[in-house]
Image (cartoon, coloured by chain):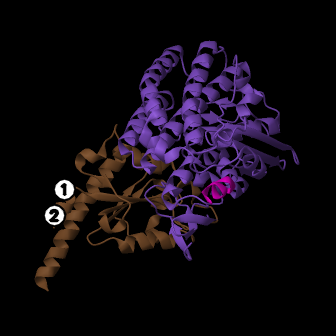
């Protein structure tokens, strides 16, 4: 073993769309220690609840992260609704879940592309992003936005999806599914992909549990934890929901779990579209959260469980808003998975936890 | 040196953006909008890049990184501020950890506002950046002749 050397990784790095800095301590070609450094994207937006009222803050909450934007607006709205004891109409719950699951499809396709790019499979990157554009077109048709939808509000949703649009969503998703199955089969069976992913970045079930890993990262280590299985809102009306897990705990398992989750989300949207109840899409929300009232909420983001906490103080501004995002949990597991790996596999391991730095730092 | 404008290479750095603009920058270069048909290529190396696409505002932690990337780029170079956060700080302008738009750190040539900035607008901004690139390289050539 040679002398230990520190190799800086990031914040500007071709494989990372976002700034994350890692000090990789390497001996020869093996990574022996990893020291993450964050703070490049910190804005301090939780403090903005002091200057924005609870209706305005939803636009800030949505911009915690541009990839999981819908999820954050749903999570925030649900928290404030339970803080104020508001019941939203069933149709609004369904619409929220449909948009949220569509963003899971777009987020996972985006991630699959980036992961393919991380091991040099650039044509696969382009194919995944080509499919993703069709999901974004659905967003644009139903909400007007491509990534920031601004469609959820406290008390319901702003826009309705009518029957014609719903039929279009279902038919577009069917089309995506055909193309996607080809991509998925390539990713899961191709030898060159397997060479880079099988056995790389192993995280055991015990470690995943001890480090409180969440989302596909935990499920790939055979930890069947998915907030959607609690059956909250429209998820409760699904005939059957089983978290997708894998037992291997390596990069290949993480790719596999996310690949299958895309198909699962498509099925969820189709099932909810068929069951869609009629009725209002919003209720009027008046007044302010009571002084000292508290509420918390969890939501399954594309990257895992996201926790929201809010406390009122009797005014329209919240006293405190706290969000714990999935990547801030998963960074701990990432440093464990990185230890002992080859320097060439660092890209792949970082990518397979699907880091979302702007969620983490807010 | 006008050939740079035939095929401008871009480098992308995420200041403190929410990812919304970052994924739109990448989407601009992917099928659908296909910026590559204009010869726009994404590179990770500042020394190879002609156009610097910055998303998000600057803060104490990343202002040094933004300056470093800009300094490493060779002349002529153009900076495009992508998205309203990069232009002025946007919705986060009064956050305690936000200094302001990218122009607080480095000179910006083209502003492309939007939240998130749309790929059509980014293509437009890159085309405007290419015109600036031509101007700058002509000025550089004139200065060399004069010297």
Observer-nearest of A33 and A321: A33
Residue A113 seen by the camera? no
Residue carrying label 2: B2
Judged from this view, the residue extending furthest toward the left is: B145
Secondary structure category for the residue under label 2: helix
The Cα–Cα distance between marks 2 and 1, rounded to whole angstroms, is: 8 Å
Location of mark 1 (residue): B6
Is A333 included in the stretch rendered in magenta? Answer: yes
Closer-to-camera residue (A59/B133): B133
The tint of chain A in the picture is purple
Residue B122 disc label:
none
Query: Which quadrant would the C terminus of chain B be assigned to in this image?
Result: bottom left
Quarter residue B110 falls in: bottom left
In the rendered structure, the answer to whether residue B133 lies left or right of residue A53 reads left
Disc 2 to disc 1: CB gap under 8 Å = yes
Residue drawn at (74%, 22%), measured in percent from left and top? A236
Which residue does the image show at 53% across and 41% down from the upper left?
A148
Magenta residues span A332-339
Chain shown brown: that is B
Does the stretch in magenta take in A174?
Answer: no
- Above or below for A237 versus B140: above
Q: Residues within 10 Å of mark 1 (few under 14, many from 20)?
A: few
Picture coordinates of residue A192, whole percent (x, y): 42, 42
What percent of the width, then of the height, locates residue B127? 26, 53
Classify residue B101 as left or right of residue A251: left
Choose between B42 and A77: the one closer to the eye.
Answer: B42
């Amino acid at each position: 073993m040679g002398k230990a050397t520190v190799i800086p990784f990031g914040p500007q790095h071709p494989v990372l769309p976002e700034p994350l800095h890692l000090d990789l301590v390497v001996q020869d070609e093996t990574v022996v220690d990893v020291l993450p450094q964050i703070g490049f994207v910190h804005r301090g937006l939780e403090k903005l609840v002091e200057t924005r009222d609870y209706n305005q803050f939803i636009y800030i909450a949505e911009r915690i992260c541009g990839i999981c934007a819908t999820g954050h607006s749903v999570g925030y709205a649900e928290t404030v609704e339970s803080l104020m004891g508001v019941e939203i109409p069933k149709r609004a719950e369904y619409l929220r879940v449909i948009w949220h699951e569509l963003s899971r499809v777009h987020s996972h396709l985006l991630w699959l592309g980036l992961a393919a790019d991380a091991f040099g499979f650039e044509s696969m990157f382009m194919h995944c992003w080509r499919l993703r554009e069709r999901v974004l077109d659905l967003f644009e048709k139903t909400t007007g936005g491509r990534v920031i939808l601004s469609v959820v509000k406290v008390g319901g949703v702003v826009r309705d999806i009518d029957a014609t649009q719903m039929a279009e969503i279902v038919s577009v998703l069917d089309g995506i599914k055909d193309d996607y199955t080809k991509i998925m089969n390539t990713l899961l069976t191709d030898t060159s992909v397997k060479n880079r992913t099988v056995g790389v970045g192993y995280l055991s079930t015990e470690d995943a549990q001890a480090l409180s890993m969440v989302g596909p990262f935990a499920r790939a280590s055979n930890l069947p934890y998915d907030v959607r299985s609690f059956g909250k809102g429209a998820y409760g009306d699904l005939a059957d929901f089983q978290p997708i897990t894998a037992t291997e705990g390596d990069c290949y398992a993480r790719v596999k779990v996310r690949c299958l989750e895309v198909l699962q989300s498509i099925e969820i949207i189709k099932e909810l579209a068929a069951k869609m109840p009629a009725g209002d899409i919003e209720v009027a929300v008046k007044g302010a959260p009571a002084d000292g009232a508290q509420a918390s909420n969890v939501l399954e983001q594309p990257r895992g469980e996201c926790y929201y906490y809010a406390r009122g103080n009797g005014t329209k501004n919240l006293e405190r808003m706290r969000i714990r995002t999935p990547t801030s949990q998963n960074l701990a597991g990432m440093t464990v998975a990185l230890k002992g790996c080859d320097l060439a596999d660092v890209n792949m391991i970082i990518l397979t936890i699907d880091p979302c730095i702007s969620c983490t730092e807010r | 040196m006008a050939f740079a404008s035939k095929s401008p290479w871009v480098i992308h750095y995420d200041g403190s953006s929410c990812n919304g603009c970052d994924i739109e920058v990448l989407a601009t270069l992917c099928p659908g909008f296909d910026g590559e048909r204009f010869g726009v290529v994404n590179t990770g190396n500042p020394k190879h890049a002609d156009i610097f696409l910055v998303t998000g505002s600057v803060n104490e932690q990343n202002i040094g990184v933004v300056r470093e990337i800009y300094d490493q780029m060779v002349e002529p170079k153009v900076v495009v501020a992508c998205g309203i956060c990069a232009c002025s700080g946007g919705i986060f302008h009064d956050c305690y950890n936000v200094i302001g738009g990218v122009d607080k750190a480095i000179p910006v040539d083209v502003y492309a506002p939007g939240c998130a900035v749309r790929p059509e607008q980014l293509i437009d901004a890159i085309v405007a950046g290419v015109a600036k690139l031509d101007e700058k390289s002509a000025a550089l050539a004139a200065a060399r002749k004069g010297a």
